Image (tube, rainbow, N blue to C red):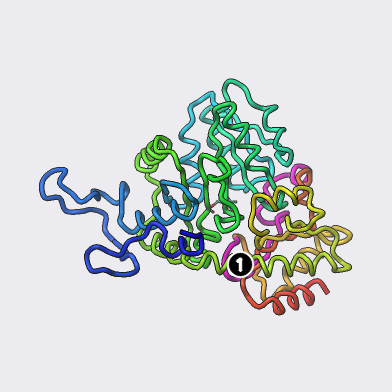
Amino acid sequence: MKFNTKTIHGGQEHDKAYGAVMPPIYQTSTYAQSTPGGHKGFEYSRSQNPTRSALENALASIENGNFGLAFGSGLAAIDAVMKLLNPGDEVISTNDLYGGSYRLFTSIFERFGIKFHFVGMENAANIENYVNDNTKLIWVETPTNPMMNIIDIKAAAKIAKKHDLILTVDNTFATPYLQQPLDLGADIVMHSATKYLGGHSDVVMGALVVKDKDLADKLYFIQNASGAVCGPQDSFLVLRGIKTLHIRMQRHCENGRAVAEYLNNHPKIENVYWPGFESHPNHDIAKSQMNDFGGMVSFTTKGNSYEDAIKIVENLKVFTLAESLGGVESLAGHPASMTHASIPKEEREKTGVVDSLIRLSVGIEDEADLLEDLKQAIG
Ligand SMILES: *Cc1c(COP(=O)(O)O)cnc(C)c1O
């Protein structure tokens, strides 16, 4: 089955009870048993729920995995991955990564005795310098947030295989429409389904997909034992979102390209970060591991003034100033005052999060309206 069919049919079967074409929202916590243990595969909705199962099967299908697991948020999914580890274990993580992942690693899991190395992985060979006997897991986010760095997943997978490490890829920005990490050698794919998979900014959810049965069993045990599952209504919404993922992503990519090129030619704009440019340092890797370049674009203004950037995001009318990304509507964010405000200026500037950096999640509106909006806002 091709990807554009999988988004609609992958892992899905019609409802057994009445043949409903869309899986019903099984708004139930428990299931009747005929005799103790005599049930139809569903006992209690933390453990299993038919709407969640339908979603989990769809997730496995679109990521070319065998097992999908859905969680109450992206961070809950990451939390489950980290619970595979024990005190004393070490993780090698991308340095330019989602702020919430960084906070979870350093503020919670470091307290439980797990050590994190935050490493620039634009040159994947760099990863190997941090491998020692305690290393258990490599955490890759690509493209990165908000600098749009690209990490070579195949090269990271080679290092993971050589040292028997678990390679996890946060595939939130790319989605399986653009990039399929399991096929490139990753062991676990992670999503904030809140973003492109849900796609309509109306739900918070996380997901994991794996190929290996053993790993799936361990993660399922954690999902059930820790309990950070998502509800049936949210499962329904994300399943519905996935059905249009391919056509939404196609338009996100087209509009993303138009916005990136427009900004790149604008006299008041200094740098534009988008992996589709031939001048992007890892453009060749992006081209080889992604089918297109996505709808996320970051940029800085000439003079790098904090006030100028604030004015631009306040002036935008079609783009909404808001956290998050990946919805049908275009959003703009100012990392230095929003997502990265808690990181000291010196620290954030090391990874490129300067005062005038603006991050755009380019939506699927008409391209002309988006360009016109940027034009009037930048002035
Ligand atoms: C949003 C996001 C997360 C966290 O997901 P939530 O659903 O907000 O918990 C993790 N990684 C990336 C890349 C994200 O954008």
Which of the 4 quarters of the picture holds residue 119? Answer: top right
* Residue 232 rendering spot, x and y as whole percentages: 35, 59
Q: In the depicted view, which residue is nearer to us: 79 or 185?
A: 185
Residue bearing the label numbered 1: 250
Please give left or right for residue 255 compared with residue 62 in the image. Answer: right
Q: Is mark 1 within 8 Å of ligand 1?
A: no
Which of the 4 quarters of the picture holds residue 211? Answer: top left
**Quick one: which residue is furthest to the front in this view?**
1
Residue 331 on the magenta segment: yes
Please give left or right for residue 103 compared with residue 379 in the image. Answer: left
Q: Quadrant of the C terminus?
A: bottom right
Please give left or right for residue 50 compared with residue 243 in the image. Answer: left
Magenta highlight: main SS: loop
Question: Tag 1: residue type?
Answer: Gln
Which of the 4 quarters of the picture holds residue 185? Answer: top right
**Quick one: which residue is furthest to the left in this view?**
35
Who's the residue at 67% across and 27% down the image?
130
Residue 311 on the magenta segment: no
Q: Which residues are magenta?
A: 325-348
* Residue 275 rendering spot, x and y as whole percentages: 73, 55
* Residue 210 rendering spot, x and y as whole percentages: 46, 43
